[in-house]
Amino acid sequence: MSTTLDKTLADSRVKFDEEIKKTDELLAKQNKDGLSEDEFKELEGHLATAETLKGQIEKVTPLRDFALSQNTIDETKGYEHPADNTVEVKDVRSLVVETLFSKRKRALSSKEYKQAFWSGLRGILTGQQTLTPDGQKALNEGTGTAGGFIVPSDFFAGIISNPPVDLVMFPRSRRFGCTGDSLKIPVLNQGTNWQGGIVINWTPEGVSKTETAPAFTQITIDIFNAAGWLALTKQLIQDAAFDIEAYVSQLLREGIAAEIEQTFFTGTGIGQPLGFLTTPGTTCTVYTPRAVLLQISWADIIHMVETLPRQDWGGAIWIVSPTAWGHIMGWTDTANRPIMSPDPQGGFAETLRGKPILVSDNCAALGTVGDIALVNPNFYGYAVREEIEIIASNVAYDAMFKNLTYVRAEMRIGAKPLKPMAFVVLDSAVAAE
């Protein structure tokens, strides 16, 4: 009897090992390429068969052990038990856990995590039975280095970030093409009158008419170079969950646009464009004093409107800093009613004296010079020698020995105010009594 039990036990073990081997093959494919629905069903079938065989082994083993204890085996028949017959039969789930993780004892990572999760999702690891130490470690939810493979942690293939900065001056200013390192623009000198100094006289009969002529001047816009670059390793490009090269290229493009926008406000004109907020020695920007220290009042708005030439009023816009805009939204009339939002349900007004209000971080903080400006962007000009260009390059030496790819963004551009008095900026100083 015991010989028959041994044979049954040995056959069950062989079949059990075959099912586990087929399971391992499918799991290996899942880890590498993934499984189709039919293959998942096949995997479940092998596991179910292994479960059945495990039950048979568990039933036969006690009977065989009892037979051995009663010395009922006929040793003269020469049948030898398989070498592993004396090994304790383990739960099929524990065996699969060992198969999966005995050679993968490493920190939690996205790839292994997902592979183990899908395996567990298909019923390989239910956690319902006693696990081996390695299996228990793999199923630990808390610490990455301790496992956690069955607790799913999905990964979003992208980056969460704020949208690009709002461009106020850049898209509204006047654009010129340029093929050299500077651009010269003739300008009518309107310092005397809006006709460039043309004088019309009333001439009596018989009296010689007085000659007149317009006066011209010239503005030179110098071209400067705005650039940025970074290096990406080959491994990062290959292993990133999304197109990292395209992503950083877009960041560089947005960075150049944001830097150019800032210089349109505060550029020094030395190695970079000249901004309308910083135009010392020119008449392009007019600084008006404020009525109340550290505040923006309705009187300031009226004064700025009066200062901007009527001819420039058509394309004018207000530009304010976030703190200045918050201050303006808090304006109230003599009855303490909100001026910028008469209807609390209707939101805040988006115009001031009929002109759009745009908020820019490039304006100064409330109470300092440039916290609010009334400008006509059509009279701020920029010349483009070269558009924003994105170049990805594998320099021979670095590509060969360092596995580096360089991504560079560059734009050649110059800019400055074009005419007098087209920019009215509120000063920090208070008007003299």
Image: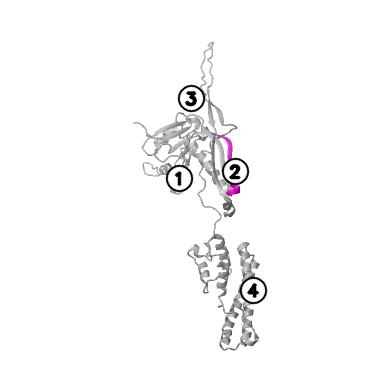
**What amino acid does circle 2 point to?**
Ile
- SS class of the residue under badge 1? loop
Distance in Å between CA atoms under marks 2 and 3: 46 Å
- Left or right, residue 127 beside residue 286: right
Residue at image coords 58%, 88%: 71
Q: Which residue does the numbered mark 2 point to in the structure image?
A: 391
Mark 4 Cα-neighbour bin, 10 Å: few <14, some 14–19, many ≥20: some
Among numbered discs 2 and 1, the one appearing first in the sequence:
1
The residue type indicated by label 3 comes to Gly
Quarter holding residue 289: top left
Q: Nearer the viewer, mark 2 or mark 4?
A: 4
Residue under numbered circle 1: 348
Q: Given this view, does label 3 or label 4 mark the residue nearer the observer?
A: 4
- Can I make out residue 171 in this image? no
Provide the secondary structure element on which disc 2 rests. Answer: strand
Q: Position of residue 345 (x, y in %)?
A: 45, 49
Q: Give the image location of residue 343, x and y in percent.
A: 44, 47
Which residue does the numbered mark 3 point to in the structure image?
191
Q: Could you tell me residue 317's position as x and y percent?
A: 49, 37
- Magenta range: 382-402
Label 3 packing within 10 angstroms: few (<14), some (14-19), many (20+): few
In this figure, which residue is indicated by the disc labeled 4? 18
Q: Label 4 near label 3: C-beta < 8 Å?
A: no
Q: Nearer the viewer, mark 2 or mark 3?
A: 2
**Inter-mark Cα distance, 3 to 1:** 39 Å
- Label 4, label 1: how far apart the Cα atoms are: 74 Å
Tell me which label, 3 or 4, sits earlier in the chain: 4
